[in-house]
Image: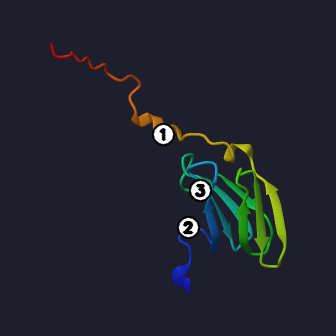
Amino acid sequence: MDECKPLYHGTYLTGGTWSPTRPGVFFTIKMDGELDVWDYYYKQNDPTLSVKVTDKALTAFNIQDTGRLVTVGAADGSATLMVGPSEFCRWQPPKSFFLHFPRRTPQISTTSPA
């Protein structure tokens, strides 16, 4: 079973889901009791926010449609309700998205046939 061990983290992931409100943001839960929030547009190699919820393995979670409330369930049957930061709840377009567009578009003149 060692061949299934995570490459960069010392624990197994037990779940994950995308944010219902922000593109590029997703949540993962792990066997060590941590909830990680990843913002792919901010940084890709590490979670943007890591919260140690419990010492037990996290087995289930749900995110409210507004992205503000997160409920996490643990292997011992406990449930934790958390209020997430507002930065992860409001829709914001990724900054790099707009870098692909020129600031000014060239004007194209057209003439009508005579």
Q: Residue sitting at 78 percent across and 75 percent down?
A: 56
Q: Find residue 77 and report its image quarter.
A: bottom right
The disc, 2 or 3, on the residue closer to the chain's N-terminal end is: 2
Q: Which residue is mark 3?
A: 46
Q: Position of residue 68 (x, y in %)?
A: 75, 50
In the image, is 28 to the left or to the right of 57?
left
Mark 1 = which residue?
A: 96
Residue 112 x, y percent position in the rendering: 21, 16
Query: Which residue lies at the image location 77% right of the left edge and 78% below the top edge?
Result: 75
Mark 2–mark 1 Cα distance, whole angstroms, equals: 26 Å
First in sequence: mark 1 vs mark 3: 3
Residue identifier under label 2: 8
Q: Residues within 10 Å of mark 2 (few under 14, many from 20)?
A: few
In this rendering, the label closer to the viewer, 2 or 1: 1
Identity, as a three-letter code, of the amino acid under mark 3: Asp
The disc labelled 1 sits on which kind of residue? Ser
- Labelled disc at residue 48: none
